[in-house]
Amino acid sequence: MIKYIIVRLALVVPTVFLLSVIVFATIHLVPGDPITVMFGIEGYYPEEVERIKKFYNLDKPIYWQYFVWLKQMATLDFGNSIVRGEPILPLITTRFPRTIMLTLGSMLVAIAFSVPLAMMAAKRHNTVIDVFISGISLTFISMPTFLLAVLMIMVFGVYLDILPTTTHRFASGSTWDVIKGLIMPCLSAGLVTSAGITRMLRTELVDNLHKDYVLFARTKGASDNRALVFHNLRNAVIATATLVGLELGYLMSGVIIIEIVFSYPGMGQLLLDGVTRRDYPIIQITVLIFALTFVVINFITDLLYSVLDPRIRYE
Amino acid sequence: MNEQASQVPGYQAESPRGLFYRRFLRNKKTLIGSTLVLFFVFVAVFAPVLAPGSPFEINALAMFQAPSSQYFFGTDDLGRDVFSRAIFGARISLVTAFIVGLASGAVGILVGLPAAHYGGKFDLFVMRAVDVAVSFPWLLLALLIASIIGASLTTVIVALSIISAPGAIRVARGKALSVKEETYVIVATAIGESDSAIMFRYILPNCVGPILVQTTLTMSLSILGEAGISYLGFGTQPPTPSWGLMLADATDYLYSAPPTLVILPGLLLLLLVLGLNFLGDGLRDLLDPKFRKL
C-alpha cells in the first residue's frame, strides 16, 4: 500500500509542476508588460516604473521570477490584491472552507440521489421505471447547472418564497440560515452531477447482474436485494469511482457558476471578480488553489479506489 | 444462413452503409436526436424569416411585457422581443458547437492517429499530457484564457476547443490502436505503403464511428459551456443574442420579469443539448458492438 501511495505521489508531482508553470505563465502571456497590465501606467514616470519593476523582481530573468513566485506560494506569502489593496491570505482562508463546504454538500446530494436511483433502475431494468429514471438522468445531464439554479430560485425563492435566493449574509447569519442558504446551491450543483453517476452506475449494475459472483450469491440463498447491495453494488462502485473523478472537474466548474448565481461568498466569486477586474495576483492564486484542490481530491479518490479494489495496487 | 439467403431469387445483400441507415432510422434515440438537431439547424438558418421582430430593437416603452400576440414570450429589460432573440440565439450555440466539434475532432485525428501509429515516447508523452488535461475543470481554463485575451465568443470557442481536444485524442488513439492490428493494416505495411497512407487511408476510415460519437458529445458539452461562460459574462458579448446571456439578463430581474424570460432560452438550450445527447447515445448504440442491440 505504501509503495502504491509513493508511486501515485510521484505521478502527482509533474502535474503540479505543469499547473504551476501554466498559472505563472498567465500573467506573462497577457499582451503588454505586467506593469502596464497591473497598474495601467505606461512609461509616464520611468523611475517609478523601474522601482515597481525592481520591487516585483520583474528586472530578473524569467526562470528566477518563477522560483521566487513558487517559494512565495509555498510559504503562503500571497501578497496583496491589486484592486482591493488588501492582503490575499485572509480572503482565501475565509472563502476556501465555504467553497469546500458547497462542493462536499453537492457531492453528498449527488451520491444520495444517484445510488438509490441507479439501484432502483437496475433492479427493474427495461421496465417503465428504468426508462423513466434514464429519461430524467439524460434531461439533467443536458441541463446547465445555472439553469437549474435559476429555475429553483424562481420556484422556491420568488414564487413560494420559502428559501433565501442569495447567501450574501452568510457571515452574519445563524447556523440555520447557513443551512437554509446552502440547500438550493447544493441541490442544483448536486443533481446535475448525480445524473451522470446514475447512468454509469446503472449500466454497471445491469452488466453485473449475470456475473458469476452475483449468480453465486443468489444460488447460496441471498435475496435479490442482498445480492444487489452487497455483491453487485460493491463491484459496480469501483468502476463508477473513475467517473466520479471526472465528474469532479465538472462539479467544480458548476460550483464556480453556482457561487455567482447565489452570490455565495466563496472562491469562485473571488476568481470571477479577479478576472473581471484584471486582478492578476488573485486570478493566479485562486486558479492555483482550485487546481491543487482538484489534484488532491483526485489523489484521494485514487487511494480510496485502491482500498476498494485491491487488484489495482498490484498492477 | 447467409449463403442460403443469397440464393433466394431477388435477394440482395445489404451494404454496410444501407444497414447503418436502416438502423439509424429504426433506433428511437438517433431518430429523436437527429430530428431535434435538424429542427434547430433549420431555426438557425432561417432565423431572419422565422423571427417576428428584430432581436436588437430596443423599446423603452415596452419593458418586461407579459406574453402577448405581439411578443409571444414577452420582452426583456430593454423591451426587446424575447422570442426573436431566442431564435437568433440558436445561431450562436450551433456555430460554437460546430467549430468546437470540428476543431477537437481534427486535433484528435491529427494527434491521436500518429500517437497510436508511431507509439513509443511520442505516444507516452501525448497520453501523459492527455491524462493531466482530460479531467481538469473546464471553467478554470476558460477563465484563464478570458483573462489573457479578453471576453468574446472567440475566447469561448478557443477555450472549449482546447478543453475538448484531449478527450478526442484519447478516443481516436484508442480506436486506432485496435484497428492497427487488423490484417488489412498489416498488409498495407507489408506492401510498403507510406506512414501517412496507412494512418489516413487504412486506419482513419475504420475509426470514424467512435470519433463521430465523441464529436457529437463534445458538441453538446460545448453548447453547455458557451451558455455557462456567456452567463458569467466572459463569452458572447451584448447585444448579441446568446441563450446564456439572455438567462443572465433574466436572472437580474427575477422579481419583475415575466417567467418566460427564463423559460424560453432555458427550454431551447435544454432541447438542443438533449437532442445532441440522444444522437450521441444512439450512434454509440449503433456503432459500438458492445452496446449494439440487434
Image (cartoon, rainbow, N blue to C red):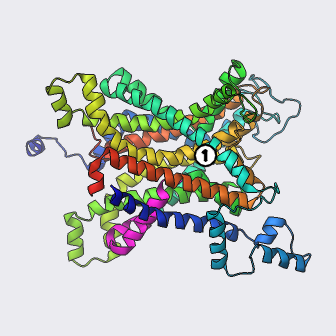
Give the image location of residue B153, x and y in percent: 67, 54
Highlighted magenta segment, given as a residue range: B109-136
Residue B66, magenta (yes or no): no
Closer to us: A199 or B43: A199
Residue B132, magenta (yes or no): yes
Give the image location of residue B118, x and y in percent: 33, 73
On screen, residue B62 above or below B207: above
**Residue in the picture at 48% in, 65% down:** A13
**Residue in the picture at 24% in, 32% down:** A209
Write down the residue under mark 1.
B93
Q: Quadrant of the N terminus of chain B?
A: top left
Three-letter amino acid code at disc 1? Ser
Closer to us: A94 or B164: A94
Give the image location of residue A59, x and y in percent: 75, 80
**Residue in the picture at 35% in, 52% down:** B209
Binning the other alpha carbons within 10 Å of mark 1 as few (below 14), some (14 to 19) or many (20 upward) gives many
